[in-house]
Amino acid sequence: MRSLFFNFFSHRALFYGLFNQAGKNIVEMAELLVAVVDTDSAELREPLYRQINALEETGDDITHKVYLGLDKVFFTPFNRKDIHILASAIDDVADNIHEAAGRMNLYHIEEFMPAIGEMVNYIRLSSNEIQKLISGLDKIEDSGSMIATCRMIKDYERMTDVIYYHALADLFAREKDAITLIKYRDILFSLEASANKCKNVTDAIEIIVLNSI
């Protein structure tokens, strides 16, 4: 019996530990993305891009460990399906931030339109709030506050959508160079997708919180 309880609590620590690592990872990636946009020098952006690449690989490794844990562990801290969905959703955020940064680098963007700065800031805000939510999953004490935070992140996603569509409309109205238009359109799309993936994380967390009530 003692072994059974030990295994249960050690498995709780395993999954919550991995989720906390994943949350901190996307926060760092979002901060680096903001730094890329705020940096004027192409030379100074290069190490930032490399750090984002490395963190995306770290995120993949964390997600893989969660999946391995699900295969090996009998007792899980909450529903197996919810663990899988949450791990996948966090990984999707990392993948899309990585994609946005990759396009900025690949396209040799030297000057970022204001909308890009606004969008990356909302992604940073969302990532930070997601990390706070994740850190609270281990001991859900104030479910109402956590649900309110989920709704706030969804508001950030809606604001990002508004910025995205206005920026896209302005881009098509004003930009005459087709190649430049495609570059900015692709980056805007990746950023909008990143914000949407943040919302998906909150959907997963909201289900976990509601099931705990």
Image (spheres, rainbow, N blue to C red):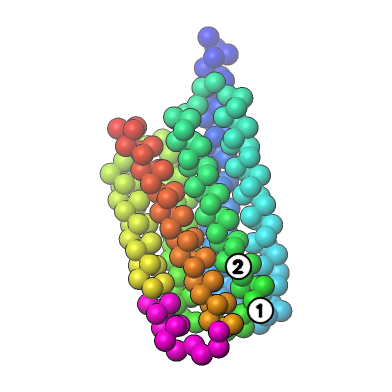
Magenta-span inclusion, residue 63: no
Mark 1 vs mark 2, CA separation in Å:
11 Å
- Residue 25 position, x and y percent, is 58, 53
**Residue depicted at 54% across the width and 14% down the height:** 4
Q: Is residue 211 left or right of residue 119?
A: left
* Helix, strand or loop: magenta stretch: helix
Q: Nearer the viewer, residue 17 or 151?
A: 151
**Residue depicted at 31% across the width and 46% down the height:** 147
**Residue depicted at 57% across the width and 40% down the height:** 18
Amino acid found under the numbered disc labelled 2 = Ala
Q: Is residue 51 left or right of residue 111?
A: right
Q: Give the range drawn in magenta.
A: 166-178
How packed is label 2: few (under 14 Cα within 10 Å), some, or many (20 or more)? many
Residue 31 visible in the current orientation: no
Look at the picture and state if 59 lies above or below 80.
below
Q: Is residue 68 left or right of residue 161?
A: right
Quadrant location, the C terminus: top left
Q: State which quadrant residue 174 falls in.
A: bottom left
Q: State which quadrant residue 100 falls in.
A: bottom right
How packed is label 1: few (under 14 Cα within 10 Å), some, or many (20 or more)? few
The reply to whether discs 1 and 2 touch (Cβ–Cβ < 8 Å) is no
The residue tagged 1 is 108
Q: Which label's residue is closer to the chain start, 1 or 2?
A: 2
Magenta-span inclusion, residue 169: yes
All told, the count of numbered labels is 2
Identify the disc placed on residue 101.
2
Amino acid found under the numbered disc labelled 1 = His
